[in-house]
Image: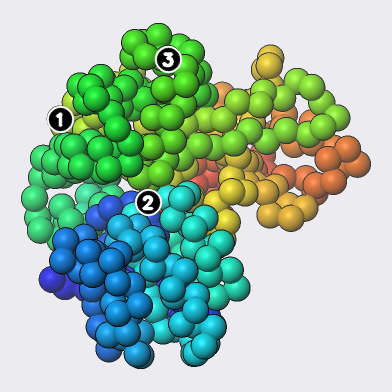
Amino acid sequence: MAVFKRVLQPSLIEAAHQLPVVLLTGPRQSGKTTLVRHCFSDKPYVNLEAVDDREYATEDPRGFLAQFPQGAILDEVQHAPELLSYLQVLVDENPTSGQFILTGSENLTLSQAAAQSLAGRVAIRYLMPLSYDELQQFPNAPNTLWETVWSGSYPRPFQSDISPADWLQDYISTYVERDVRRLAAIGDLSTFQTFMRLVAGRTGQEINLSRLGNDTGVSHNTISHWLSLLEAGFLIWRLPPWFTNYNARWVKTPKLHFVDSGLVCALLSIREPDQLAFHPLRGPIFETWAAAEIMKHRLHHNLPARNIYHLRQTRGLEVDILIENGSTLTAVEVKSGQTLSSSFFKTLPALARQLDEKQTGHKPPDLRLVYGGDKSQVRRDIDVIPWNRLADFSW
């Protein structure tokens, strides 16, 4: 299978020159195995999804690791988390940089376990599905707005030239039938599948656990747990609210986004790109796509995604994305329309007027508008960014 360039590659290699262990984590099928085997082709490779290797690693971790005196690539290490403690002993005895390259597709618990067991010894990097610019390396890459949003950005459909819709349906089934059962005991899978479709219908919106529970027919606590499962599997992410202590008008509810807009379309049974142009959720779905592109940009350049927020007041002002870099704020409005309208330019100047530096400690925000058209310009001190030019900007 041909190797394609990933933005994260330089940061990944640099990490291996600095610390003895590197953990690359991210969604299933985001290209982690391809990337590490390309970057570290001289290392032995073991996939811990294979039952025999997994049993060896869990039943005799010392003997398993003794096979690799110069280190190795250990793929899907979440299947043998016990190895992390034994790795700590090994790298303390021999702290040579770049010995072990680990990959895993379970968020939160794996990263936390690695940070605890290998604190000061491990570099953690995140590989998301392809950014729009990465996607353009493929000859069959989409190049129109709604085809791009609908197709999603997992590499496999473009590497294998298969229908994104069919592949994404299989991906969802695999996740529900295998990963969810491994992460938690869910008796009624059909209810969980209904839950996933309802969550897809709420992408780009604030999370209301009670309403989602009522619509699904399960408790508030169950919804909270199931959302955590989707987050642990890198299917969704929560955009926290940004607010200042001096003002009680800020809403403090997180916003939900899917990591991949193609997954949203598959869950909502949107079978053709043209359906999106008239779909009632086209705005939130496009916002999810744009937010994911910004999140990928930050993670693939080893910048923290936790600095991305949304902002809404109880009455009035609402900004889709707010990025905080020290004392600098970047405010982003996302509009799916392909023609610029004067209404697009009302919120951002109002935000700039409200964020007084003396009260917030921030400089006046950089203002950006991402929209579904193709013309770049600057209007009212706002950078107008076409949907396919996000990579031209630092986020």
How has the structure been colored for display? rainbow
Give coordinates of residue 24: x percent, y percent. Answer: 40, 65
N-term-proximal mark, 2 vs 3: 2
How far apart marks 3 and 1 lie (CA) works out to 31 Å
* Disc 1 packing (10 Å; few <14; some 14–19; many ≥20): some
- Which residue extends farthest right? 358
How far apart marks 2 and 3 lie (CA) works out to 25 Å
How far apart marks 1 and 2 lie (CA) works out to 29 Å
- Check disc 1 and give the amino acid type: Arg
Residue pictured at 15% horizontal, 30% vertical: 271
Most foreground residue, 91 or 89: 89
Return the residue at label 1.
271
Check residue 35 in the rendering and tell me which mark sits there, or answer none: none
N-term-proximal mark, 1 vs 2: 2
Check residue 219 in the rendering and tell me which mark sits there, or answer none: 3
Return the residue at label 2.
106
Q: Are marks 2 and 3 in contact (CB under 8 Å)?
A: no
